[in-house]
Image (cartoon, rainbow, N blue to C red):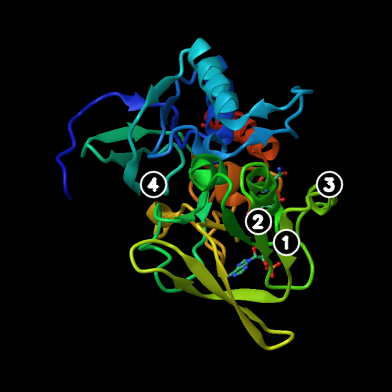
Amino acid sequence: MFLKLKKKQIQDCIIIGSGPAGYSAAIYASRADMNPIIFTGSLPGGQLTTTTDVDNYLGFPEGINGNDFMKNCKKQAERFNTKIIHQSVTRVILSNQKGGIHRIFLDNKKCIESRGVIIATGSRPKFLGINKERKFMGLGVSFCATCDGFFHKEKDVAVIGGGDSALEEANYLSKICQKVYLIIRKDYFRASKILQDNISKKNNIHILFDSNVTEIIGNNFLEGIKIFNHKNKTNKTIFISGLFIAIGHIPNTEIFLNELDLNDRGYIMVKKGKTITSKPGVFASGDVQDPDYRQAITSAGTGCMAALDLEKYYLSL
Ligand code: NDP
């Protein structure tokens, strides 16, 4: 063991992650007197802090900026006295016993003990797996148009992917960049109809179907990409200053690998219609257990469910 455990207070509710699921769980857990502590992780507020406007969350008729939305979530959790700690969890030891104590290890080497744990660690974007992609992160390659789009003002950029994320990124970039190439490996979009309609109205978005990026060009920073059209069997080179990758996500479940049941894609398995995991007193909410819906509103909903499931768990002890 890498740190010495001291005898200390056992918590009722530790929440790992600070996206909509984490804060929603915190609000419900606080109001149920479970005195939750949130460990925010390395991206406080989660993925929504890097998104543009959230237009589909109920109750915001004009939409709301993702970052502002998460600040509001934090404020609301603080109003009910949730303790918010800016640290990451590096390891967990989860008890198999009903009523057992779970150990949560932090990046400052401290260990917190709790009978209840709510996991809301979310997911992270996938890489393409081609040369120079990681090397040029921040040097032209990006996962976030709102964060980095500004650097490509009035220049040409490309977005990869045909899902909602890619189309949102393309839409955002089309407002500041000269030309946006949207590169899709199939001959159809996976994105929702409304986003497809938005894209079709933009005359500076050029859609390339049946296409894969095969190479990144540039010595010290991104200068262009090579694209292969697998239908026509043709190669094409385009010169761009920014490449925005939006091809899906990987759940942040590495620290739970040997502790919880995960499915074949690495998502935490929960009991159908619940947030109950394979360990008693441990509940999972948000994207970390949801490969399908991945919406702020569904995340917040499952965060609420996790707090209620934890409350029921205590009543059953
Ligand atoms: P998706 O999994 O929906 O889409 C990923 C896209 O990337 C697909 O077009 C996929 O192609 C493509 N892709 C995957 N791997 C590669 C690869 N190696 N090379 C090239 N292309 C690749 O991911 P999203 O992040 O877009 O969305 C995830 C979920 O989040 C969805 O449920 C979505 O509805 C939701 N979401 C909702 C938003 C909203 O409502 N405002 C905003 C953003 C996300 P293929 O189809 O061939 O697999």
Tag 1's secondary structure? strand
Q: Residue at x 74, y 85 (%)?
A: 231
Label 2 neighbour load within 10 Å: few <14, some 14-19, many 20+: many
Task: Mark 4 and mark 3 in contact? Answer it, CB < 8 Å.
Answer: no
Relative depth, front residue between 170 and 82:
170
Tag 2's secondary structure? strand
Sequence order check, earlier mark of 1 and 4? 4
Task: Give the residue type that dot 2 points to.
Answer: Val
Indicate the quadrant of ligand 1 in the picture: bottom right
Task: Mark 3 and mark 1 in contact? Answer it, CB < 8 Å.
Answer: no
Mark 3 lies within 8 Å of ligand 1 (Cβ measured): no
Task: Give the residue type that dot 3 points to.
Answer: Ile
Q: CA distance from mark 2 to mark 4?
A: 47 Å
Q: CA distance from mark 3 to mark 1?
A: 18 Å
For disc 4, the marked residue is 94
x and y percentages locating residue 307 in the rendered image: 57, 30
Q: Is residue 304 left or right of residue 259?
A: right
For disc 1, the marked residue is 206
Sequence order check, earlier mark of 3 and 1? 3
x and y percentages locating residue 317 in the rendered image: 51, 31
Sequence order check, earlier mark of 1 and 2? 2
Mark 1 lies within 8 Å of ligand 1 (Cβ measured): no
Q: CA distance from mark 4 to mark 3?
A: 43 Å
Q: Is residue 278 left or right of residue 63?
A: left
Label 4 neighbour load within 10 Å: few <14, some 14-19, many 20+: many
Q: Is residue 225 visible?
A: yes
For disc 3, the marked residue is 194
Which of pointers 1 and 4 indicates the residue nearer the eye?
A: 1
Relative depth, front residue between 258 and 79:
79
Q: Is residue 120 visible?
A: no
Q: Is residue 221 left or right of residue 29?
A: left
